[in-house]
Amino acid sequence: MPETPLLEIKAIDAFYGDFQALFGVSLSIAPRQVVAVIGANGAGKSTLLKSIAGLMQPHRGEILFEGNLTAGAPAFDVLRRGIALVPEGRRLFPSLTVEENLLIGGQSGRPGPWTLARVYELFPVLAERRNLPAPALSGGQQQMAAIGRALMANPSLLLCDEISLGLAPIVVRDIYARLPQIMAEGLSLIIVEQDIAQALRASSHVYCLQEGRIALQGSANQLSRESISAAYFGV
Amino acid sequence: MQWLNVILQGVLIGGLYAMFAAGLSLIFGVMRLVNIAHGDLIVLAAYISLMVTQSVGIDPINSLLIVVPAMALLGYALQRGLLNLTLGDDLLPPLLVTFGLSIIIQNGLLEFFTADSRRLQAGLIEVETFQLAQGLFIGALPLIQFAVAILVIAGLQVLFYRTALGRAFRATSDDQSVAQLMGLDTRHVFAMAMALSLAVIAIAGVFLAIRTNFDPAIGPARLIFGFEAVIIGGLGNMWGTLAGGVILGVSQAIGAQIDPGWQLLAGHIVFLAILAVRPQGLFPRISG
């Protein structure tokens, strides 16, 4: 990779108690790059994102963000450094309104292009429903709110965990259609997806996880379907 | 008219009970911590006010200017230094630790101030009364105390629903790990909640100590009144907590009017009756 990476993960191991979820996983992402992480259920995709976001601490290995070690830093500190996670299942704050959810994301005080007005411009439907409690939104709208909430923190790296989970294909397409607008603000993106076709379309580089190890990686347009399905299912 | 008087006094004392309860409810709402030392902290605030009034020579109401920040600071330190370490998936450790804290505070106060019963002297407002109607009297102190209780509850309500700190409280209460992901240091959020709770405790403690005699052992009974007011009103609803305090106060006043020995019993019976009929409280959380 010609540019110096924004995020560099060097051989991390992660555990849930005695269960090892990641085995020496390495990954790197350049500024303004979109990287997809694919893999079957339980392959360690969410664990990888949680480790980057500071929700989990890897037992071994290093995570460097903008040249600084972040492994060991708590999640709230990682966010302030510029990494925001859109968690799997959206997980909006149910007792807050849509707008309050967005404002929470902005509370870290990082300067940047994303404001309430910008998020409402990106997702106009949220502006109409700003004063509703978050659970009153449809699944797709909740996902928009979850993305908006993370953007409000003005991250330089956005992590998206299973954006398409439980959403109708048309809604998923609608959300993915906004990605270029988000990318235009100069951030980098790591998307975790089960929907491989969607992941390949949206990204420039793909990592495939299989049982906690990187089974395959390469440019999105160079990987063959056969090699992906081999790495995905481990056959 | 006599009964009207009794009910009125009960309503006014209910404001004090609501202040006992508000801090308790706040802490449970934000971090699922049941603070067994709550009552003893109320008594501690009363003693701090006693020290301030004696050493600085100001009256108890003005001593709030010192006691409230002091208690808030103590709350922040207590949460950061001790209680945060007990929080986790299990409700038991914080319960045990605050129980221990209760014993430590009681015995510490006993050692320092002896078991003598004390009282804060607030001067004229203690005895001043107005006549609302023929035979219907209202004391200045209970009236001030009730007004302060309403201000405290309204203030908490505004803070919870209109400020960034309140938003952080509600978000953390909803989902701690996502709150962290969104840049909230939950240790700090919890400490701010405890500071706020102890600031309310300080106000309640000073009014309690002006109203009645206190000694190091009366804390646990105040905790019970606080609990009862919270449960009657319904968890998570501040105005419900005020209503709960008022119901408790009125029940006690009516009980005492029938027979002086029935004052506390009547309060407990009404509490149990409401718990049996509406375990979720009269006004459970409306939204948020």
Image: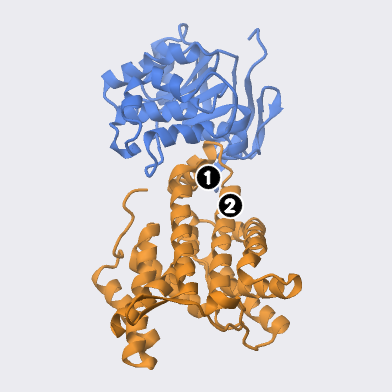
Chain colours: A blue, B orange
Image coordinates of residue A83 in percent, x first then y, are: 57, 28
Across and down, in percent, residue A133 comes to 33, 39
User: Which subunit holds the residue at mark 2?
Assistant: B
Name the foreground residue: A122 vs A174. Answer: A122
Dot 2 corresponds to which residue? Answer: B192
Q: Residue at x 53, y 18 (%)?
A: A113
Q: Would you call the spot at circle 1 few (<14 residues within 10 Å), some (14-19), or many (20 or more)? A: some
Q: Position of residue B109 (x, y in %)?
A: 67, 79
Mark 2 residue element: helix
Going by the numbered disc 1, the residue's amino acid type is Leu
Residue B97 placement: quadrant: bottom right
Looking at the rendered structure, whether the residues under marks 2 and 1 are on a common chain is answered as: yes
Most extreme residue toward the left, as rendered?
A: B277
- Label located before the other in sequence (2 or 1): 1
Q: How many marks?
A: 2
Give me the residue at 31% from left, 82% from top: B269
Quarter of the rendering containing residue B17: bottom left
Residue A188, relative to residue B253: is it above or below?
above
The amino acid type of the residue labelled 2 equals: Met
The residue to which callout 1 is attached is B165
Q: Check disc 2: other Cα within 10 Å, few if <14, some if 14-19, many if 20+.
A: many
Tell me the distance, in whole angstroms, between the alpha carbons under discs 2 and 1. Answer: 9 Å
Left or right, B205 with respect to B113, comes to left
**Where, quadrant-wise, is the N terminus of chain A in this rendering?**
top right
The residue shown at (41%, 17%) is A199
Residue A231, visible in the rendered structure: no
Question: Residue at (48%, 59%) from the top-left corner?
Answer: B152
